[in-house]
Image (spheres, rainbow, N blue to C red):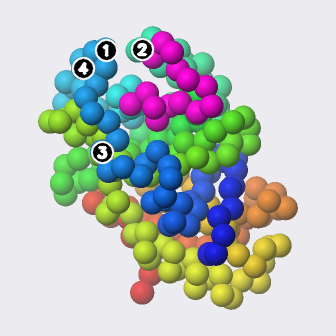
């Protein structure tokens, strides 16, 4: 993929991964350590041994929740009110399945994946800016370290190299849509742990997006299904 195309988050909570140059480029997830310490009100939540997706939302550093508008009074009540609005697609919580959408300033989608081998939680997160349809700002897989009270970027859990190789292979034989390039869009799951990769096309309706491949969670990291 030779150029960067900004795509939009649709109301069915899909999100797009652009080319690797942007992922490792000038965005909020370019640093490996995303936060140093917590706010005072977050400390009690951090002490919980088992955390839900809601707990992780409460523990996120404020800067990950900020879009065009600065959040002046960030506290537990502020974040609770956002989730309690429950007006999908802007704010939504499925605590049982580890899935959350919130719009404090930026548009944030989070999904929890359990690493059964290393006994830790991996959070898939995407941040969008502006109003509906949301323009993607940045995205990543991150994890919280209870010992250091820090959020850390996890680059190893997702097969980025294979993802782009697979996309380029399919792009060379593309016969659908209005563009020669594939615009990969990854659907972060609310149910189950399988990610579906679609070819987004702005001229087509949501239901006509071309399915490219699936990415499965193997209890420790992601793998492209049927990838040689």
Q: Position of residue 86 (x, y in %)?
A: 60, 23
Tell which circle, 3 or 2, labels the residue nearer the N-terminal end.
3
As measured in the structure, the alpha-carbon distance from the residue carrying label 4 to the one carrying label 1 is 6 Å
Q: Position of residue 106 (x, y in %)?
A: 58, 33
Dots 1, 2 in contact, CB < 8 A: yes
Residue at numbered disc 1: 41
Tell which circle, 4 or 3, labels the residue nearer the N-terminal end.
3
**Relative to 77, residue 51 above or below:** below
Assign a secondary structure to mark 4. Answer: helix
Location of residue 84 by image quarter: top right
Dots 4, 1 in contact, CB < 8 A: yes
Residue 64 drawn in magenta: yes
Residue at numbered disc 2: 75
Examine the residues drawn in magenta and state their main secondary structure. loop
Assign a secondary structure to mark 1. Answer: helix
* Quadrant placement of the N terminus: bottom right
Dots 4, 2 in contact, CB < 8 A: no
Residue at numbered disc 4: 43
Tell which circle, 1 or 2, labels the residue nearer the N-terminal end.
1
As measured in the structure, the alpha-carbon distance from the residue carrying label 3 to the one carrying label 1 is 21 Å
Q: Position of residue 189 (x, y in %)?
A: 51, 51
Can you tell which of label 3 and label 1 is closer to the viewer? Answer: 3
* Quadrant placement of the C terminus: bottom left
Residue 85 drawn in magenta: no
Look at 58% across and 33% down and name the residue there.
Answer: 67
Residue at numbered disc 3: 33
As measured in the structure, the alpha-carbon distance from the residue carrying label 3 to the one carrying label 2 is 22 Å
Tell which circle, 3 or 1, labels the residue nearer the N-terminal end.
3
What span is in magenta? 61-74
């Amino acid at each position: 993929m030779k150029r960067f195309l900004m795509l939009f988050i649709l109301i069915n909570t899909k999100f797009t991964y652009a080319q690797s140059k942007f992922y490792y480029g000038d965005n909020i997830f370019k640093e490996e350590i995303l936060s140093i310490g917590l706010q005072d009100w977050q400390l009690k939540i951090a002490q919980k041994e088992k955390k839900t997706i809601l707990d992780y939302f409460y523990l996120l550093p404020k800067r990950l929740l900020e879009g065009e508008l600065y959040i002046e009074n960030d506290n537990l009540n502020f974040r609770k009110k956002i989730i309690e609005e429950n007006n999908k697609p802007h704010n939504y919580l499925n605590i049982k399945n580890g899935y959350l959408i919130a719009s404090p300033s930026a548009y944030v989608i989070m999904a929890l994946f359990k690493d059964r081998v290393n006994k830790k939680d991996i959070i898939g997160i995407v941040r969008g800016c502006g109003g509906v349809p949301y323009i993607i700002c940045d995205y990543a897989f991150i994890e919280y370290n209870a010992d250091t009270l820090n959020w850390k970027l996890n680059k190893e859990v997702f097969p980025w190299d294979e993802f782009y190789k697979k996309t380029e292979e399919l792009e060379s034989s593309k016969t659908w849509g209005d563009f020669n390039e594939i615009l990969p869009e990854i659907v972060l799951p609310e149910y189950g742990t399988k990610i579906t990769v679609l070819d987004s096309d702005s001229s087509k309706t949501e239901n006509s997006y071309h399915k490219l491949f699936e990415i499965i969670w193997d209890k420790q990291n992601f793998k492209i299904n049927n990838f040689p």
